[in-house]
Image (cartoon, rainbow, N blue to C red):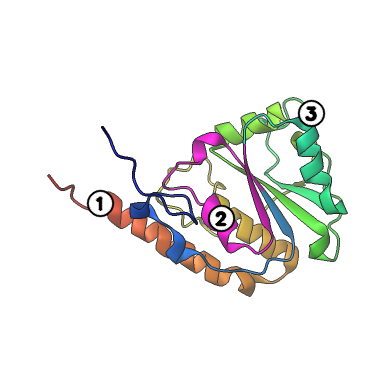
Amino acid sequence: MRLSRAQCPRCLRPQSACICQWITPTPNQAEVLVLQHPLEVHQAKGSARLLHLSLEKSELITGECFDQQALHGWLHAKGRVNVLLYPATPEAEAEAAPQPLTAVPADPAQVRLVVLDGTWRKSLKMLHLNPMLHQLPRLALQTSAPSQYLIRKAHRPDQRSTLEATCLALQQLESAPERYTPLLAAFDTFVASLMRASHAPRQA
């Protein structure tokens, strides 16, 4: 009989892969809604859980094709302006063009940043399966800084981890880059630990 591995009650990962040491409490102003593809839930290299546990105002929901009534409720709670963190691409506009992002409220507390956590292919599928998401105005990152997420292969030069992209977007929305520096630094050490583990010799 195979015994299940002990799980951390906070980060929900096996104790041997616990990420709690990198949790960095961060008082974000704009609310964050992370919609996580089911295949990312147990991905050891994933960053969404660390992001969620670090941000003061965030919600993490798992699914691919969401119940549209539930999705409507999540998006329209508290009367915030929803903005989807997603680049404008020909593939993403195949079915219907998204609304243009004409203006962002001056007060970041009025904004909800919607983030899709998944590979490029999976996030694109989530868009197509959930027309309500596809129609949200888009926020594109205004930075050319390279990603530090070296542990996973990127298929596009502008691809970043969910944590990196969200922090950069919040910096952009809130005009407060220093607020997210500690969390990004903690993420860098998390990635470094994964890279060390991947190169460590396996025990016989």
Residue 130: image location, x then y, percent: 73, 30
Q: Amino acid at mark 3?
A: Ala
Q: Amino acid at mark 2?
A: Leu
- Residue 199 shows which numbered tag? 1
Q: Secondary structure at mark 1?
A: helix
| Residue picked out by circle 2 | 163
Q: Say few, some or many: other residues with alpha carbon within 10 Å of mark 3 (under 14 / 14 to 19 / 20 or more).
A: few
- Residue 151 shows which numbered tag? none
Q: Secondary structure at mark 3?
A: loop
Residue 59: image location, x then y, percent: 66, 51
Sequence-wise, the earlier of marks 1 and 3 is 3
Q: Which residues are magenta?
A: 34-62
The quadrant in which the C terminus is found is top left
Q: Could you give the CA–CA distance between mark 2 and mark 3, rounded to whole angstroms?
A: 28 Å
Left or right: 26 as drawn, with respect to 15? right
What residue is shown at x 29% (from left), y 39% (from top)? 3
Classify residue 27 by image quadrant. Answer: bottom right
Residue 143: image location, x then y, percent: 63, 59
Relative height, residue 80 to residue 154 (above, below): below
- Residue 96 shows which numbered tag? 3
